[in-house]
Amino acid sequence: MEGSANYRQALTKAMAMCSQSERCRLDVAEKLRVWELSDQEISMAIDYLINERFLNEERFADFYINDKLKFNKWGRIKLSIMLRQKQIPEELIRSALSRIDGDLYKKTLFDLLKSKNKSLKATSKYERNWKLATFGHSHGFEADLAFEVASQIADDK
């Protein structure tokens, strides 16, 4: 942990930030840039954080997927897109998505659509099914799964 006083201070802040919650390389680099570190210092800091296990993008992807599925009710498609925007490597994204529990995933979609169904105005079962499936798909769930779950809910109505 060598460098200027500003570098050491920024690195200490970054370590504290990474200790509080999982972060990805991109988010930490942006924060270090705001703290006015040079590109070389940012690179050194990121390497240090990775070597000391403050940063781990596989761990970040797992936590990100778990939180966004649970709290935001996002499907695999949206999760994948958002992780790509955070510049997580494709193989880590695929690996993390494959660890999603299938039953939990389907139940999340079911609960999301069931909740939406309460406020939905539709004149026919077909229209209700279409609107529910479209809503599920807009949250990043696969179209075929969204239609399957929407059909179950529309049939119950």
Image (cartoon, helix red, strand yellow):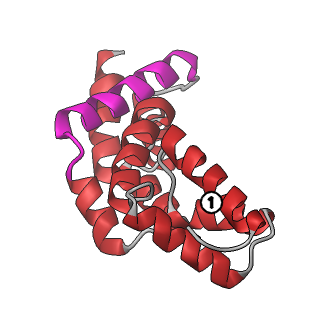
In the image, what residue occupies the spot 53% across and 25% down?
123
10 Å neighbourhood of mark 1: few (<14), some, or many (≥20)?
A: many
Relative horizontal placement of residue 108, taking residue 134 as reference (left or right): left
**Residue at screen point 73% across, 72% down:** 4
Residue 21 in sight: no
**Numbered circles on residues, count:** 1
Q: Is residue 105 magenta?
A: yes
Residue 67: percent from left, percent from top: 43, 37
Q: Whole-percent x and y of residue 99?
A: 20, 49
Asked if residue 110 lies in the magenta stretch, the reply is yes
Residue at point 51%, 15% (across, down):
118
If the image is split into quadrants, where does the N terminus sit?
A: bottom right
Drawn side of residue 46 relative to residue 148, left or right: right
Q: Is residue 151 above or below residue 153?
A: below
Q: Is residue 123 above or below residue 49?
A: above
Q: Is residue 135 visible?
A: yes
Residue 68 at x, y percent in the picture: 46, 40
Name the residue carrying label 1.
Answer: 11
Front-lying residue, 82 or 37: 37
Picture coordinates of residue 51, whole percent (x, y): 38, 67
The kind of secondary structure element at disc 1 is helix
Residues shaded magenta: 99-120
Would you identify the image quadrant in which residue 57 lies?
bottom left
